[in-house]
């Protein structure tokens, strides 16, 4: 076997980073303009950012595509939910779940998203999936292929890449042979400590400290990388030296590049938002400068 060709990840931004401001002090165009200005080329949106979801008007769709063209941005991932408890009593049937997923596949296809951050219903804070997930996900696979989308389950703290359900997902992928289900690795899974000034109390604080003491290691990526089609470049604070002190970015990006990862790194800011959108924009620019310096382009 030949040597793996070095990967060239793409830089992008999740509109979630602006979620405190969009629809208030920022429009979608303001977000796109900011993303373009920092040199990013790809973006993620949540369904809540789509006006009129799940039936956006033709006028809104046209405007969306005009903005993509104007700011030279490529739709990368749409965040949505596979929620089984939308009503009281019994959970939704597998058929109802598939219909819910198909609705989102159609929206994603209409807007050019080929990847979905599919939030499978969980039973605890470690994101262990509700039993039975594999039934409706497998039923949905032909429709995912039809609408050219990949359903990606997100791995973020306090879940590590060593959690049992991660290997259940891998077994499902191998069993079905699908290319339409995989992972979005959120860099929060590598976080080694809370950012200074973060206040977490009670059982949550205990759980997070246990996670920080033994987070995912960059080399843990190797098990999931063949099935990873997107990454959330999570961060909470970029210091004046353009360093994210709680997440080992250089080590993570080295593993990705050395093992041929060519998909997107979508910035997901989860720090302070009380200082205004200008502060968030500055934080994002610092992070993109850091990633550009590490990647060399």
Image (tube, rainbow, N blue to C red):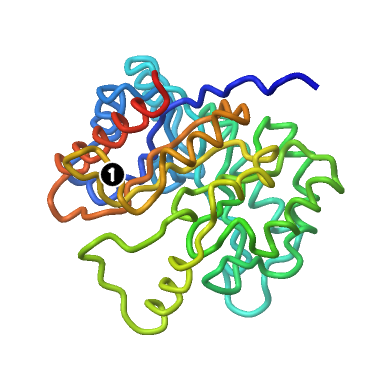
Residue found at x 32% / y 47%: 269
Q: Quadrant of the N terminus?
A: top right
Q: Quadrant of the C terminus?
A: top left
Along the line of sight, which residue is nearer the eye, 93 or 245? 245
Residue bearing mark 1 = 18
Residue 114 placement (x, y as % from top left): 59, 31
**Side of 115 where 213 appears, left or right:** left
Residue 220 placement (x, y as % from top left): 61, 50
Residue found at x 75% / y 51%: 170
For the view shown, which residue lies furthest in the right direction? 175
**Side of 236 where 124 appears, left or right:** right
Specify the quadrant of the image occupied by residue 239.
top left
Instruction: In the rendered view, tell whether residue 202 sits above or below residue 235.
Output: below
Specify the quadrant of the image occupied by residue 49.
top left
Residue found at x 39% / y 50%: 247
How many numbered tags mark residues here? 1
Instruction: In the rendered view, tell whether residue 134 sits above or below residue 211.
Output: above
Residue 222 placement (x, y as % from top left): 65, 43
Q: Secondary structure at mark 1?
A: helix
């Amino acid at each position: 076997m030949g040597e793996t060709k070095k990967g060239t990840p793409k830089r992008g931004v999740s509109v979630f980073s602006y979620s405190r401001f969009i629809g208030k002090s920022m429009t979608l165009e303001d977000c796109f303009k900011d993303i373009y200005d920092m040199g990013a080329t790809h973006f993620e949106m949540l369904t809540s950012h789509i006006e009129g979801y799940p039936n956006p008007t033709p006028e809104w769709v046209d405007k969306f595509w005009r903005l993509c063209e104007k700011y030279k941005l490529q739709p990368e991932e749409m965040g949505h939910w596979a929620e089984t408890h939308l009503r009281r009593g019994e959970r939704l049937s597998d058929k109802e779940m598939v219909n819910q997923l198909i609705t989102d596949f159609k929206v994603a296809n209409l807007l050019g998203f080929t990847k979905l951050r599919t939030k499978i219903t969980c039973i605890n804070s470690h994101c262990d999936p509700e039993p039975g997930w594999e039934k409706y996900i497998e039923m949905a696979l032909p429709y995912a292929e039809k609408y050219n989308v990949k359903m990606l389950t997100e791995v973020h703290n306090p879940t590590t890449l060593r959690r049992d359900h991660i290997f259940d997902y891998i077994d499902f992928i191998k069993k079905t042979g699908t290319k339409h289900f995989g992972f979005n690795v959120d860099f929060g899974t590598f976080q080694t400590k809370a950012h200074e000034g973060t206040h977490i109390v009670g059982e949550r604080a205990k759980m997070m400290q246990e996670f920080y003491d033994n987070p995912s290691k960059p080399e843990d990526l190797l098990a999931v990388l063949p099935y990873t089609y997107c990454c959330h470049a999570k961060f909470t604070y970029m210091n004046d030296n353009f360093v994210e002190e709680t997440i080992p970015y250089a080590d993570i990006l080295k593993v990705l590049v050395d093992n041929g990862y060519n998909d997107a790194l979508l910035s997901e800011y989860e720090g302070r938002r009380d200082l205004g959108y200008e502060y968030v924009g500055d934080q994002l620019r610092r992070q993109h400068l850091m990633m550009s310096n590490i990647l060399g382009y």
